[in-house]
């Protein structure tokens, strides 16, 4: 910075005037200007990064891995200019942002937009309405989100406090998944052969695998804390294909928010977080500096039939030592106990503990009446091998995944454009089935024919319809937990259980008072989950499994929410720089 030429008296005068203005301006006048437009520029470019003793070229934003943090306040408008300098087509998704009447900025490729092609740019323009907490952004095309991701921190409005003790410090912790090989080659090869893609080589915390991997001790996340202070850990699971158990040795965590919605505080030693979920926890440091360091660890919760990356990413919690005590002394490193990799009971119990605050200030607006009911089976299946090709799935087939036995075929025009301009013919149909094609013992012996159908099929909903969806896991190929993510809405998790959903008995037990409000929920392995949401956001909204391999195989569908009658109930036209297909 250049030297200031203000005289000391002039500086004092300026300070006095500023203070006087703050004192004399009434609160509303300040508040009126509190909503800010924040500008970000995201340059998508390649960067050489070394992990596990191997260097590879990865796709990044602004050369950073993980990508830059977006910070906003509730009510702020964001203008994020994304410029694509790489050979891949790119889109970015602002995961969990409601995108009220701004569906053009949501980001999933061929759902709300065509991708940003090499050398092109697009400005994502949206306002954060009625939300505060931790979310994240990530690429939403192919497997590029393996390295294209970063945190979104939405602070409460000015002068609004958290409904929990103010932390001394806030720390983002974003979990990722690392492959030594090129992830685009891995998924492209798998989709050609019909086999399962190769599993990852490591998990990461803020891009660092940690000391439990070979050649990785220097790449370790360190959390330094002061005794007696409280820290807010903003946890994000940006891994591609794995749910994670998380724990810090000898410390209890308090969950205070999930998916950017405050929850009734839950004390726990272990947190379960699926891809697509965010969880804010309070960590209270011990009052005295202990003579030890503590391992921060995360490893998979895996229930499916396939092999998985059964490794552990770790960081270290270190206490500030008084007067340099123990400065050069090697402190013992204590390790946490994590559940077994397939502990579905822990997963169910943890999920059931999460409840909305449901206070006057933070109400749980659960739809009491239901206009449209859906029963979706979610799970795996098989597709026939293309002619003149050999496939590596069972009996020369290709592995697939589906909702109600429909494996979603990606269109080559964005659904939202086709919907907005009434040009859906040949792009998509609105005959997505409300129920599976036939009933069977979903969690018992699978039917003999497990081939899926394929199509670009959506559900059309009238504006403001209240919707209930029961999602039922199936045992086809193998029962598995599926973290389902809905774009454009939060939903309420009104019920869940193991086995087959019973429509005559289970609804009586639904929680309509303080259910969890989320954007991503795990469909229990060998079980079901029931959600409700209000279709108050016109547009085309993607719903898919957040295990990227299952999305690639077709475990996805779309909701088309039609315009309402009022001006605030209609989707505005697309921006002029919306990418072309």
Image: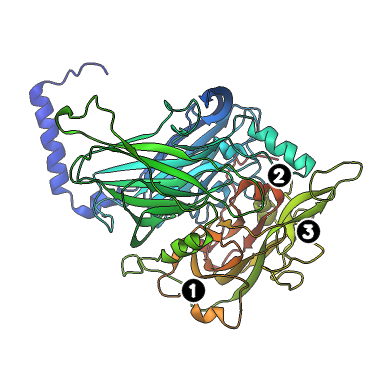
Residue displayed at 52% across by 59% down: 489
Chain-order first, disc 2 or disc 3: 2
Nearest the eye: 490 or 462: 490
Residue displayed at 52% across by 24% down: 49
- Whether pointer 2 and pointer 3 mark residues with C-beta atoms closer than 8 Å, the reply is no
The kind of secondary structure element at disc 2 is loop
Nearest the eye: 581 or 306: 306
Nearest the eye: 39 or 300: 300
Spot the residue most to the right: 388
| Residue mark closest to the camera, 2 vs 3 | 2
Which residue is identified by label 3? 452
Chain-order first, disc 2 or disc 1: 2
Q: In which image quadrant can residue 267 be found?
A: bottom left
Q: Is residue 507 left or right of residue 417?
A: left
Give above or below for 342 relative to 298.
below
Can residue 517 be seen at all in this image of the molecule?
A: no
| Label of residue 196 in the image | 2
Circle 3 Cα neighbour tier, 10 Å, few/some/many (<14 / 14–19 / ≥20): many
Residue displayed at 57% across by 48% down: 104
Q: CA distance from mark 1 to mark 3?
A: 33 Å
Which residue is identified by label 1? 367
The kind of secondary structure element at disc 3 is loop
Circle 2 Cα neighbour tier, 10 Å, few/some/many (<14 / 14–19 / ≥20): many
Circle 1 Cα neighbour tier, 10 Å, few/some/many (<14 / 14–19 / ≥20): some
């Amino acid at each position: 910075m250049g030297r200031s030429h203000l005289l000391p008296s002039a500086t004092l005068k300026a300070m006095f005037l500023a203070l006087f203005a703050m004192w004399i301006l009434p609160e509303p006048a300040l508040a009126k200007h509190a909503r800010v437009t924040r500008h970000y520029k995201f340059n998508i470019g390649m960067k050489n990064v070394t992990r596990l003793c191997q260097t590879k070229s990865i796709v990044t934003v602004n050369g950073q891995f993980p990508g830059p943090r977006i910070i906003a306040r509730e009510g702020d408008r964001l203008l994020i200019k994304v410029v694509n300098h790489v050979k891949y087509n790119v889109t970015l998704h602002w995961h969990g942002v409601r995108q009220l009447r701004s569906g053009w900025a949501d980001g999933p490729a061929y759902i709300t937009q065509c991708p940003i092609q090499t050398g092109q740019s697009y400005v994502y323009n949206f306002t954060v309405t009625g939300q505060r907490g931790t979310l994240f952004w990530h690429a939403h095309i192919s497997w590029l989100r393996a390295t294209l991701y970063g945190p979104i921190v939405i602070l409460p409005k000015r002068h609004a406090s958290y409904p929990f003790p103010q932390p001394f410090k806030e720390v983002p912790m974003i979990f990722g998944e690392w492959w030594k090989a090129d992830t685009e080659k891995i998924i492209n090869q798998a989709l050609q052969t019909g086999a399962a893609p190769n599993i990852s080589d490591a998990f990461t915390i803020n891009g660092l695998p940690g000391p439990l991997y070979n050649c990785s001790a220097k790449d370790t996340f360190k959390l330094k804390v002061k005794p007696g202070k409280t820290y807010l850990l903003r946890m994000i699971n940006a891994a591609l294909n794995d749910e994670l158990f998380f724990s810090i040795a000898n410390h209890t965590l308090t969950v205070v928010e999930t998916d950017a919605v405050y929850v009734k505080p839950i004390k726990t030693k272990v947190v379960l977080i699926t891809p697509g979920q965010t969880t804010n926890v309070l960590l209270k440091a011990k009052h005295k500096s202990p003579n030890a360091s503590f391992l921060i660890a995360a490893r998979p919760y895996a229930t499916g039939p396939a092999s998985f990356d059964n490794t552990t990413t770790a960081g270290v919690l270190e206490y500030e030592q008084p007067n340099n005590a123990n400065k050069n002394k090697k402190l013992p490193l204590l390790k946490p106990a994590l559940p077994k990799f397939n502990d579905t009971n822990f997963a169910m119990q943890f999920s059931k503990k999460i409840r909305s605050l449901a206070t006057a200030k933070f109400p749980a607006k659960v739809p009491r009446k239901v206009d449209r009911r859906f029963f979706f089976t979610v799970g795996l299946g098989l597709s026939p091998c293309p002619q003149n090709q050999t496939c590596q799935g069972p009996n020369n087939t290709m592995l697939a995944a589906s909702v109600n036995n429909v494996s979603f075929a990606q269109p080559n025009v964005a659904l939202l454009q086709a919907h907005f301009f009434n040009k859906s013919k040949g792009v998509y149909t609105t005959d997505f089935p409300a129920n599976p094609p036939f009933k069977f013992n979903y969690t018992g012996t699978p039917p003999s024919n497990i081939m899926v159908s394929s199509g670009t099929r959506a559900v059309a909903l009238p504006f403001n319809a209240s919707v209930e969806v029961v999602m039922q896991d199936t045992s086809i190929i193998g029962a598995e937990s599926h973290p389902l993510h809905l774009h454009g809405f939060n939903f309420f998790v009104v019920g869940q259980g193991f086995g087959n959903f019973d429509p005559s008995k289970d609804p009586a037990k639904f929680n309509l008072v303080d259910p969890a409000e989320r954007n991503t929920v795990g469909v229990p392995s060998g079980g079901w989950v029931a959600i409700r949401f209000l279709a108050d956001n016109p547009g085309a909204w993607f719903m898919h499994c957040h295990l990227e391999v299952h999305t690639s195989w077709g475990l996805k569908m779309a909701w088309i929410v039609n315009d309402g009658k009022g001006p605030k109930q209609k989707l505005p036209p697309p921006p002029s720089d919306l990418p072309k297909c």
